[in-house]
Image: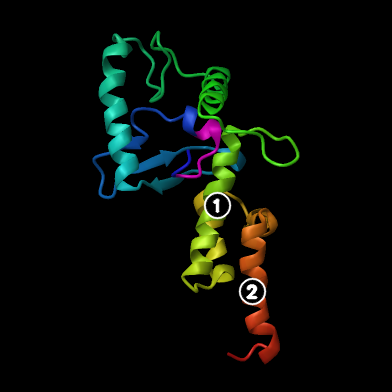
Amino acid sequence: MASTGLRVGEALRLTLADVQLESHPPQLHVRETKFHKSRLVPLHPTTADALRRYATLRTPRDCGNASDAFFIGAQGQPLSYDALRRWFTTRSQQLGLAPILGGRRPTLHAMRHTFAVRRMQLWYQEGGDVQARLPHLSVYLGHVRPQESYWYLTATPDLLVAAAERFQGYAPTGGVQ
């Protein structure tokens, strides 16, 4: 989820057929998600490698059970949100991940948020046109309209600073570069 920006439910609903690790590039077929949209999500090679390793570990646990869910629990049943949340909470505590300002603890959904913010930060660092690229990020994240992705622009101080610095470079010239 951290490397793809998937929603928790999207990851949990992936089937064996949806995880296309032998495609070029490897990809996930995210079907009928929020707003009844489907999309293909390309995978970074390191993410595809991790999923391949998981798939080899998953097979012995499957025991021929009928579940075609990609992510499964110890008994071969589809992994539930509650089981994943408990695992994530335990691992976060073991790693010493503390609550951020305001007392909010790390959450599964925060990985999606971090994915989107980091992508925009990278575009700013590269000098890219974030406004022009935002519709692409919106489609990638499965949003219906780009406006649904705009709130990420002010979601973190670093991203807000990057946007403000870009605006400062634009404003004094009256839009002429």
Q: In the rendered image, which residue does mark 2 sit on?
A: 165
Decide which of 171, 73 is in the foreground and name it. 171
Give percent across and percent down for residue 111.
54, 40
Q: Quadrant of residue 98?
A: top right
Q: Is residue 6 magenta?
A: yes
The span from disc 1 to disc 2 (Cα, nearest Å) is: 19 Å
Q: Mark number for residue 116? A: 1
Question: In what element is the residue under mark 1?
Answer: helix
Dot 2 crowding, Cα within 10 Å, few <14, some 14–19, many 20+:
few
Q: Answer with the quarter of the image where residue 154 lies.
A: bottom right
Q: Residue at x 38, y 12 (%)?
A: 76
Q: Is residue 77 magenta?
A: no
Compared to residue 133, the image places residue 74 above or below, namely above
Chain-order first, disc 1 or disc 2: 1
The residue that appears at 55% across and 43% down in the rendered structure is: 112
Magenta range is: 4-10
